[in-house]
Amino acid sequence: MQVQEKQKTTLQIRKISPHIGCEVTGVDLRQSVDAETKAQLNKAVLDNVCMVIRDQHLTPEEFARVAELFGEVQDQDHPKYSFPGLPTIKRHSNYNVDPNGNRIKEGLHWHTDGAFRDQPPKFTLLYAVELPDAGGNTNVVNMRAAYRSLPEDLRRRLDAMKTNNVRMGSKARFRVNTNNVAIMAQGGQVPNQHPLVRSIDGTGEKGLWFNPNTVENIVGMDPEESQNFLYDLMDKVIRPEFTYSHQWRLGDIFMWDNRSSMHKVNFDYDWNQHRLHYHATTRGERPN
Ligand SMILES: [Fe+2]
């Protein structure tokens, strides 16, 4: 039997800013990596909340194997966008259409992925395959740093709060994801109750954690009051120093700790140009 030699890497990890982001170079993830490299990559994304791995050349199948370095890869929320035979990998394209044949500005507003699930994603990974000439950055904000920045009395109050989460809240301010609107119209789902402040396994830290689009309500508040409360909170904590705006290059894998952050995409690019990523998530613990 032929044994594939583990690659000898010249892996380099560079911190991008004090509060968020790191850049990885010198690794080709088409080849298998040793346990130490795998551990270094996992530690880097946990420590820095988001991470870009430059200069990759991956098929969808290879991208799925890369995602497995970071945990158990989950099936997609909307299977119609997955590659045939690869239910875990989405073709994340601005040409994708909803059930009415309309294109969606997916990720236009701040959110965290899969908050309506029992075990929302630990990591989200994107791999750039086609990009517009300019614009289309993906922005990530560190919600652990956001939580730490709040006064003690407000933190204690937030610690006690719980959110009820569905595919799309009835009073969500931005009902952009019409796939989720359609699912709610067909009967929705039993809400998943999650804490507004969660601990993040592997870090010993806590962070603010919610997706305003999927919150039906905060326990003890009505849906509208809940939306106002969450957007006021976001105004307080989404600060430039906690945020990294990723300007894409072809071949980038950009990933984030979805339990410790919110993200959104800039729709400032020419929407006639194709923007295509492969997309995967890994399973997280049940929030507590
Ligand atoms: Fe997202």
Image: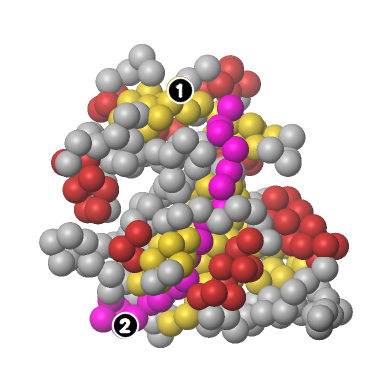
**Residue 162 - label:** 1
Kindly tell me whether residue 237 is visible in this rendering.
Answer: no
Count of labels in the image: 2
Q: Residue at x 51, y 53 (%)?
A: 74
Q: Position of residue 44 (x, y in %)?
A: 74, 57
Residue wearing tag 2: 273
SS assignment at label 1: strand
Res. 144 image quadrant:
top right
Residue 105 visible, this angle: yes
Front residue (pair 1, 122): 1
Residue at figure coordinates x 21%, y 61% from the top left: 98
Q: Whole-Å distance between the Cαs marked 2 and 1?
A: 41 Å
Amino acid on which the number 2 mark rests in the picture: Gln
Task: Please tell me whether residue 46 is drawn above or below residue 208 in the rendered image.
Answer: below
Q: Earlier in the sequence, mark 2 or mark 1?
A: 1
Q: Is residue 280 above or below residue 118?
A: below
User: Where the N terminus falls, by quadrant?
Assistant: bottom right
| Chain part drawn in magenta | 270-288
Instruction: Indicate the quadrant containing the C terminus: top left, top right, bottom left or bottom right.
Output: top right
Residue 20, placed above or below residue 245: above
Task: Name the residue furthest front.
Answer: 1
User: Which of 125 and 137 lies nearest the eye of the viewer?
Assistant: 125
Identified by mark 1, the residue type is Lys
The answer to which quarter of the image holds residue 45 is bottom right
Taking the spot 56% from the left edge, 33% from the top edge, the residue there is 286
Q: Nearer the viewer, residue 74 or 101?
A: 74
Residue 183 as seen in the image, left or right of residue 62? left
Helix, strand or loop for disc 2: loop
Reply yes or no: does residue 80 show up in magenta: no
